[in-house]
């Protein structure tokens, strides 16, 4: 069945408090999706962001971002007073992460101190999530005590998790640990309410799972055997991608690589838990950098660029066979952008997961691209572009003349309509069962609305909608495009 959806992260929703939340504007966006006949809402990862503010570098693969807790709901629950959360944010269009970091936890701590922990739902949440929550809350409490420094800089006995030292900090930081548990309880409670509302409206949630986790995370600190670390807990090798047309030095991501042999001996239990958790949070999971399960790029720790790396073999189909055996069929999208070898194609075929096709990658006038729509099959997810690409408006502006002519001719663009709309229509018209369009493209926004420029920090993940963006005219345009190409829900 042909369906379509919109890519927009929670952080990009309007709100009065500096960043999008699970509050009324999220519900309003669900209503907007329903009225415009959308079947999917695709998000970026929901984890708590660290330095650089990237949702792909988080303090936990399982935790939720406390910034997304809606403060107005806490007021309704009498955990906050309205005058305690007077907005000071200067920009409605961009997230100010520095201000959030300095102010939001002070406000949330006030809510925590009023919260009654003798709550059955709260106790159940802690019990149900103890496998990761205990380590995460302790990790964050210790980080807070040491002003946010990476765990690799902690005292040796704490870094190595000596039981008597762990016990000491659990007692000393009891209230701070409970604070971080409370934040997760409220985050998840509000998220599941929003997800139920979306599902009841016929909108399914597509979530995003990074293949790698951040080195400075509770996952690595608490489960060091699962990662390629030395006896001092430093990485032996780190993740990245080799030099290509986009980057002469490649991309050095810095994430620790997995100890796949150890994971396999334990039936990939950490990965099974991770996919199980994601499948409860989302209706469909997009796994980022899927090719890394077949072949992953390994760069010696300490290198300044990704030039001196090697390709290594990943777990391949063995991992996904175990996941299917333990969890049954899970709706997964394979982000298969990158170096597509015959082995990667076989893995994709063996799993049966749909891959991704980006129309922004399709128009090279020198040769026929794998991303050209007439080569698609039904079992792919087609996009104009993603969070890592230019918006389509900016992409058109920068396209070389020959490629631009090729593209406009291919998508049958006529001069009296928007080039962006023509590319969206070509995406919606293709044979793929599912299409996803970034909200910025429907709004015809340029680079000022780009979410991420890979390998850069400081100005990414900031763009937001303002309330007037979601108007009736845009809603009807999206609905018309959706119905025109047979992707409506009715």
Image (cartoon, helix red, strand yellow):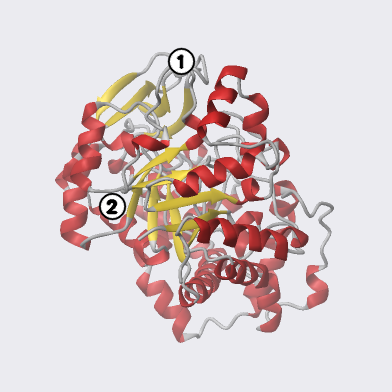
Camera-side residue of 195 and 128: 195
Examine the rendering and report whether any part of residue 72 can be seen: yes
Q: Earlier in the sequence, mark 2 or mark 1?
A: 2
Camera-side residue of 204 and 183: 204
| 291 horizontally vs 101: left or right | left
- Tag 1's secondary structure? loop
**Residue 469 horizontal/vertical position (percent):** 73, 58
Instruction: Identify the residue at image location x=57%, y=83%.
Output: 116
Find residue 270 and name its label: 2
Instruction: Identify the residue at image location x=58%, y=54%.
Output: 9
**Residue 240 horizontal/vertical position (percent):** 42, 27
For marks 2 and 1, give the one nearer the viewer: 1
**Residue 458 horizontal/vertical position (percent):** 68, 35
Label 1: which residue?
366
Instruction: Identify the residue at image location x=32%, y=34%.
Output: 292
Give the Cα distance between marks 2 and 1. 45 Å
- Badge 2 crowding class, 10 Å Cα cut-off, few under 14, some 14 to 19, many 20 or more, is some
| 264 horizontally vs 136: left or right | left
| 138 horizontally vs 311: left or right | right
């Amino acid at each position: 069945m042909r369906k379509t959806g919109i890519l927009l992260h929670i952080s990009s929703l309007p709100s009065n408090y500096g960043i999008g939340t699970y509050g009324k504007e999220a519900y309003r966006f669900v209503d907007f999706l329903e009225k415009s006949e959308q079947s999917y809402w695709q998000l970026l990862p929901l984890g708590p962001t660290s330095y650089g503010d990237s949702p792909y570098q988080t303090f936990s693969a399982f935790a939720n971002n406390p910034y997304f807790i809606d403060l107005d709901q806490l007021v309704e629950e009498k955990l906050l007073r309205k005058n305690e959360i007077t907005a000071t944010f200067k920009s409605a269009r961009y997230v100010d992460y520095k201000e959030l970091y300095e102010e939001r936890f002070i406000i949330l701590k006030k809510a925590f101190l009023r919260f009654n922990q003798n709550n059955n739902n709260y106790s159940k949440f802690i019990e149900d999530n103890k496998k990761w929550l205990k380590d995460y809350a302790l990790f964050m409490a210790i980080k807070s005590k040491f002003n946010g420094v990476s765990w690799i800089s902690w005292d040796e006995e704490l870094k190595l998790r000596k039981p008597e030292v762990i016990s000491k900090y659990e007692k000393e930081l009891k209230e701070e640990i409970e604070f971080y548990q409370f934040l997760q309880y409220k985050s998840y409670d509000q998220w599941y309410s929003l997800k139920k509302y979306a599902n009841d409206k016929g909108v399914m949630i597509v979530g995003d799972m990074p293949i790698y986790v951040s080195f400075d995370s509770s996952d690595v600190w608490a489960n060091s055997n699962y990662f390629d670390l030395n006896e001092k807990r430093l990485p032996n090798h780190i993740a990245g991608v080799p030099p290509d047309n986009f980057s002469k030095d490649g991309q050095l991501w810095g994430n620790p690589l997995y100890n796949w042999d150890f994971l396999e001996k334990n039936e990939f239990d950490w990965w099974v838990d991770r996919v199980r958790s994601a499948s409860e949070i989302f209706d469909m999971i997009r796994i980022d950098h899927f090719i890394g399960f077949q072949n992953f790029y390994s760069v010696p720790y300490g290198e300044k660029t990704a030039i001196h790396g090697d390709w290594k073999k990943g777990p391949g189909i063995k991992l996904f066979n175990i996941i299917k055996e333990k969890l049954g069929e899970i709706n997964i999208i394979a982000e298969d952008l990158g170096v597509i070898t015959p082995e990667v194609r076989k893995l994709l075929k063996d799993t049966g997961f749909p891959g991704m096709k980006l129309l922004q990658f399709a128009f090279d006038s020198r040769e026929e691209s794998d991303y050209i729509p007439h080569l698609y099959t039904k079992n792919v997810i087609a996009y104009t572009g993603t969070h890592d690409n230019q918006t389509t408006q900016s992409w058109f502006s920068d396209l070389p003349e020959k490629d631009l002519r090729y593209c406009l001719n291919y998508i049958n663009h006529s001069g009296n309509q928007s080039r962006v709309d023509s590319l969206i229509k070509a995406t919606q018209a293709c044979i793929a069962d599912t299409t996803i369009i970034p909200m910025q493209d429907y709004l015809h926004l340029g680079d000022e609305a780009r979410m991420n420029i890979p390998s850069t920090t400081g100005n990414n993940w900031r763009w937001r909608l303002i309330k007037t963006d979601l108007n009736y005219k845009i809603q009807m345009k999206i609905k018309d495009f959706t119905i025109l190409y047979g992707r409506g829900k009715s």
